[in-house]
């Protein structure tokens, strides 16, 4: 995590004019920041790849890749997209500003640059970066916790990663908004995080659960929702965690929801969860083939448990999406 007050933040200054680079560097190092300089767009991208950068100040007009190009590259890379980018420009037209916004710029500075404005914008964006880092750290802890629960049962190895991929792919196939597809990807990892409160003797029991053990198991969606609820970025994930064990006929848990009362995203994850469980070896049975798994799910849909239209979509996805097919092969390899 950055700490701009103690001079730990690293700022990339990219400008083909040496005097401008020296001016920016003097102002920023005078405030305790570490500064990395680049003479053009290509050098700026190499600097991004070779070291940790907390903020990028990019001149718009540079040889080769422009500031717009570099900004777009930074923002399109999952590893760097949350790094704040300021475009420094002498251009004043609205079209150029719009182009910068479309490239993903977080802010603009006009030449000649005022030193106080530069420092004020730098401090503001670094504070935002620090908040983003805290959020990413919190999500990482939750993901690690979820994977540690999965690791307790050797038969569920890789289940979270596969479910995350399946669910996000289903979201795209169904044309769901981007944020809901992201929620499905996250939920694939953390959907069973509430099992942290389920005793291991219950979690990996090979025989039928007693009524008392089943009552404990049925509480895990509520526990999972409670664990993840402090993260505002998980607001669309919470309904998936809570409701992915509901059934269309109301016989599921924890709330006994029926039909469309169950959120679509929860039904999507539910279908992919069931499918992956069926094609994976479990202590009480061998893995089913793809055909047998789909047939089993269709039989259960006729009982009123699952959404048959989503089973159709999942089958089509698996048949036509190569990455998903490859993931299934990997699942069977273990």
Image: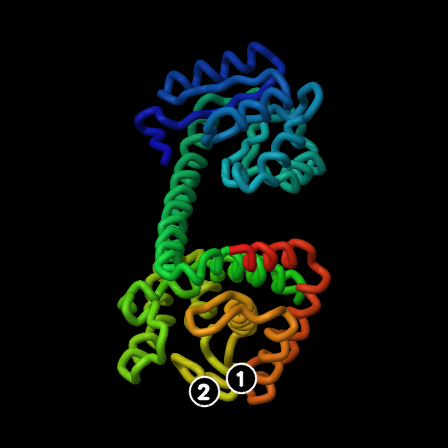
Q: Position of residue 191 (x, y in %)?
A: 43, 64
Q: Which mark is residue 251?
A: 2
Q: Nearer the viewer, residue 91 or 196?
A: 196
Q: Residue at x 56, y 59 (%)?
A: 332
Residue 323: x, y in percent? 65, 54
Q: Nearer the viewer, residue 113 or 225?
A: 225
Report x, y in % for residue 45.
59, 26
The residue at which mark 1 appears reads as 305
Residue 181 visible here? no
Can residue 4 be spotted in the picture?
yes
| Residues marked 2 and 1 touching at CB (< 8 Å) | yes
Q: Could you classify mark 1 by the number of other residues whose Cα lies within 10 Å: few (under 14), some (14-19), or many (20 or more)?
A: many
| Mark closer to the chain start, 2 or 1 | 2
Nearer to us in this view, 211 or 240: 211
Describe residue 5's horizontal placement relative to residue 86 as left or right: left
SS class, disc 1: loop
Residue nearest the viewer, comparing 25 with 159 = 159
Q: Residue at x 50, y 85 (%)?
A: 258
> Residue 296, percent across and down?
59, 79
Mark 2: secondary structure: loop
Horizontally, residue 122 falls left or right of residue 16, namely left
Q: Residue at x 52, y 38 (%)?
A: 79
Q: CA distance from mark 2 to mark 1?
A: 8 Å
């Amino acid at each position: 995590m950055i700490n701009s007050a103690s001079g730990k933040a690293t700022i990339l200054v990219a400008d083909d004019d040496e005097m401008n680079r020296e001016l920016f560097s003097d102002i920023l190092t005078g405030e305790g920041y570490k500064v990395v300089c680049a003479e053009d767009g290509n050098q700026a991208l190499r600097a991004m790849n070779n070291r940790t950068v907390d903020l990028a100040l990019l001149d718009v007009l540079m040889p080769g890749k422009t500031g717009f190009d570099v900004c777009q590259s930074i923002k399109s890379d999952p590893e760097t997209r949350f790094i704040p980018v300021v475009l420094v420009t002498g251009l004043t037209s609205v079209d150029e500003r719009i182009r910068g916004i479309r490239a993903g710029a977080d802010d603009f500075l006009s030449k000649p640059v005022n030193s106080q404005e530069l420092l004020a914008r730098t401090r503001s964006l670094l504070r935002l970066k620090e908040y983003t880092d805290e959020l990413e750290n919190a999500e990482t802890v939750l993901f690690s916790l979820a994977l540690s629960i999965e690791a307790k049962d050797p038969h569920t190895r890789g289940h979270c990663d596969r479910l995350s991929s399946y669910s996000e792919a289903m979201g795209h196939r169904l044309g769901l908004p981007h944020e809901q597809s992201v929620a499905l990807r996250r939920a694939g990892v953390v959907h069973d995080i509430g099992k942290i409160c389920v005793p291991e003797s219950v979690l990996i029991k090979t025989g039928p659960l007693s009524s008392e053990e089943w009552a404990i198991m049925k509480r895990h969606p509520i526990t999972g929702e409670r664990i993840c609820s402090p993260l505002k970025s998980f607001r669309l994930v919470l309904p998936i965690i809570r409701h992915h064990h509901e059934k269309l006929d109301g016989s599921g848990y924890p709330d006994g929801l029926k039909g469309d009362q169950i959120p679509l995203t929860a039904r999507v994850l539910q279908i992919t969860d069931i499918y992956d469980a069926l094609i994976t070896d479990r202590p009480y049975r061998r893995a089913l083939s793809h055909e047998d798994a789909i047939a089993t799910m269709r039989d259960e849909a006729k009982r009123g448990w699952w959404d048959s239209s989503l089973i159709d979509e999942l089958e089509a996805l698996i048949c036509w999406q190569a990455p998903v097919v490859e993931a299934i092969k990997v699942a069977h390899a273990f």
